[in-house]
Amino acid sequence: MIKTSDLITFTGTLVEHLLVQVEYPWEVLSKINEYILELGKSLSSEDFIQIDQDIWIHKTVEVAKTATIIGPTIIDKNTEVRPGAYIRGNAFIGKNCVIGNSTEVKNSILVESVEVPHYNYVGDSILAPHSHMGAGSITSNIKADKKDIIIHHNGDKIETNLRKIGAILGDNVEIGCNAVLNPGTIIGKNSHIYPLSMVRGVIPANHIYKNKSEIVLMRE
């Protein structure tokens, strides 16, 4: 359940050709920069405007005057970038997303229909379609000891060889307000995280995370 194809629906999106290359989603984090630069050159000038060097924005995107966007960045159609948003580069933001007030996005992929609407930090992360981060929830992307991040799953230790990984959110994941997702957190499809949670590790699909001792299967 931690493989890219198990977590993220990406067929038909502008990042399909990137995500299909990797078995595990964190493997794309070092490829985002190059992918955006190559993809940007191929985007139709009828649909996208290159507003600055290495920044391509679809003509339907709404960008507040007080937002800051640094390239390389691509923002796809019908997305809203609200006042005070800070997009720090190496950011792919897909269709129908919301980048909200004082939200910061860096070296991340928001596949499409993702909402990070209020005071969020999204760094070195991948957010699958229809995932949502509640107000004040953040991804922590580096360990205190600055060592490489290891993914622990079913008794296995997966060496990522990366010092920075934020969180991987599967389709339809809901993160409660002021939750902290520790480095390398993976949350399976349709799962919900309670507000004020501190989450670490792999959370299975279709579960509710109340605390580290109480992770329960959703009822139908």
Image (cartoon, grey):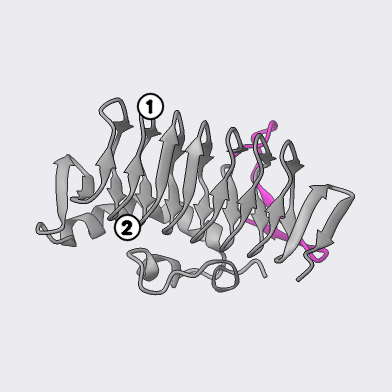
Q: Which residue has dot 1 on it?
A: 84
* Percent position of residue 12, x then y: 36, 73
Residue drawn at x 55%, y 50% as measured from the top left: 132
Decide: is 50 above or below 82.
below
Reply yes or no: does residue 29 show up in magenta.
no
Q: Is residue 104 left or right of residue 151?
A: left
Front in this rendered view, residue 28 or 182: 182
Q: Would you call the spot at circle 2 few (<14 residues within 10 Å), some (14-19), or many (20 or more)?
A: some
Q: Quadrant of residue 52?
A: top left
Lower position in the chain sequence, tag 1 or tag 2: 2
The disc labelled 2 sits on which kind of residue? Tyr
* Secondary structure beneath label 1: loop
* Secondary structure beneath label 2: helix
| Discs 1/2, front | 1
Q: CA distance from mark 1 to mark 2?
A: 26 Å
Residue drawn at x 37%, y 55% as measured from the top left: 96
Q: Quadrant of residue 35?
A: bottom left
* Percent position of residue 116, x then y: 49, 43
Q: Residue furthest right?
A: 213
Q: Quadrant of the C terminus?
A: bottom right
* Percent position of residue 18, x then y: 39, 65
Q: Are marks 1 and 2 in contact (CB under 8 Å)?
A: no
Residue drawn at x 59%, y 41% as measured from the top left: 134
Q: Quadrant of the N terminus?
A: bottom right
Disc number placed over residue 59 in the picture, else none = none
Q: Would you call the spot at circle 1 few (<14 residues within 10 Å), some (14-19), or many (20 or more)?
A: some
The disc labelled 1 sits on which kind of residue? Gly
Decide: is 26 above or below 120.
below
* Percent position of residue 170, x then y: 59, 61
What is the span of residues highlighted in magenta in the rendered image?
141-163
Q: Which residue has dot 2 on it?
A: 35
